[in-house]
Image: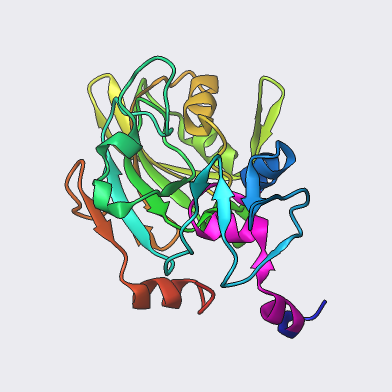
Amino acid sequence: MTAAEEATRGERIAKFLARAGVASRRDAERLIGEGRVRCNNVVVTHPATFVGPDDLVVVNGVLVEPPARTRLWRYHKPEGVVTTHRDPEGRPTVFQKLPQQLGRVISIGRLDLNSEGLLLVTNDGGLARRLELPSNGWLRRYRVRVHGRPEPQALAALARGITVEGVRYGPIEAGLDAVKGENAWLTVSLSEGRNREVRRVMAALHLPVSRLIRVAYGPFQLGNLPRGAVEEVPARVLRDQLGGGA
């Protein structure tokens, strides 16, 4: 099917739900498979179902509002907050801390409980999935405090990648910034951003991490954004950085 034909028919329902901020495309497909999505009061059975501007889509009995324009925010996540919508242990979550007027948003990647710094959030699930892909080549940059004295040769070797407990991690740029007593500060950059990657790699070098701050995600910087603050990325900047694809 051509793009013109798809535009005439509307858009696939999984993409519609992702743009509406209901879930990522993958999770939207799961919701459809579980029979939890209806279009014009008919249960949707296939993610390739098309949705037009006059169609009514309901998920779990709740009407889905048509997708708003794509928006992106920078959030300075503090330590002690989990990046999830619901936490079974009752810990505070990022989405509880964000202003309610943002509506339903999705994080682009995650920061673990004890990590802090830049977290991007968006109302467009499709954009979130796109920006998480390692293929876009965007570096995630961190300031990392470790206990111990890093060996320059060991840090330089990370540029070739490293295998930790059977998991292969891609190239990592790591440079020593300062040594203070028994601790050292590093700048670490990577493009994959796997779960707890920096902590696991540093532990393999016998450098336990005591503080981890993400300062950049691709072209977006933490800058002087105060801890706990959120700031929208201007639409023009978003378009420029995404090559008009937002």
- Residue at x 46% of width, y 38% of height: 110
Q: Is residue 47 left or right of residue 140?
A: right
Colouring scheme applied when the structure was drawn: rainbow
In the rendered image, the residue lying farthest to the front is 41
- Residue at x 28% of width, y 29% of height: 79
Pick whichever, 142 or 29, lies toward us.
29
Magenta residues, dominant SS class: helix
In the rendered image, the residue lying farthest to the top is 89
Image-quadrant location for residue 144: top left
- Residue at x 45% of width, y 72% of height: 241
Q: Is residue 98 left or right of residue 69?
A: left
Q: Could you say where residue 76 lies in the image, as x and y percent from the top left?
A: 27, 45
- Residue at x 29% of width, y 35% of height: 96
How many circles with numbers are drawn on the protein? 0
In the rendered image, the residue lying farthest to the right is 1
| Magenta segment | 5-25
Q: Could you say where residue 140 lies in the image, as x and y percent from the top left?
A: 46, 49
- Can residue 160 be seen? no
- 233 in magenta: no
- Can residue 236 be seen? yes
Image-quadrant location for residue 33: top right
Pick whichever, 92 or 210, lies toward us.
92
